[in-house]
Amino acid sequence: MLIKELNYSTVRIISKLSNGNSSTGTGFIIRFAEQYRAEQYLNVPSIVTNKHVIDGAIEVTVRFHAANANGKK
C-alpha cells in the first residue's frame, strides 16, 4: 500500500442500536489472503473495527472516502 492510500483506508461506521441510540466509530479497510493464483491477483477486502463500534447494532452504515480515477474527491 502506498502512503497516499492510507487516507482512503479509513471508514466511518455509524451503528443504530435497538434502543434508538446510535454509536459511531472508525474502521480500516484491509486485504486478507493476498495471493497470485493462475496469474490472477486475489484478495478478500475486509473492514476491521473494534467490537464496541458494532456490538448490539441492528443497522450499520459505512461511509467511504470517494475519489475519481485522477484522485480528486
Image (spheres, grey):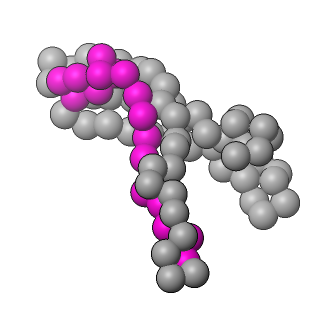
Does residue 5 lie above or below 22 as drawn? below
Residue 23 on image: x %, y %: 35, 18
Number of numbered tags placed on the structure image: 0
Question: Could you tell me which residue is drawn at 22 percent across and 28 percent down?
Answer: 57
Give the magenta-colored segment's residue range. Answer: 40-57
Asked if the stretch drawn in magenta spans residue 44, the answer is yes
Does residue 15 lie above or below 69 as drawn? above
Q: Residue furthest left?
A: 18
Q: Quadrant of residue 56?
A: top left
Taking depth in this image into account, of 15 and 52 the one nearest to the observer is: 52
Residue 68 on image: x %, y %: 75, 60
Residue 35 on image: x %, y %: 51, 63
Question: Could you tell me which residue is drawn at 81 percent across and 53 percent down?
Answer: 71
Question: Could you tell me which residue is drawn at 49 percent across and 25 percent down?
Answer: 26
On the picture, is 39 further left or further right than 4? left
Q: Visible in this render: residue 45?
A: no
Taking depth in this image into account, of 19 and 63 the one nearest to the observer is: 63
Taking depth in this image into account, of 38 and 72 the one nearest to the observer is: 38
Q: Visible in this render: residue 37?
A: yes
Residue 39 on image: x %, y %: 57, 81
Q: Quadrant of residue 70?
A: bottom right
Question: Could you tell me which residue is drawn at 49 percent across and 67 percent down?
Answer: 42
Asked if the stretch drawn in magenta spans residue 20, the answer is no
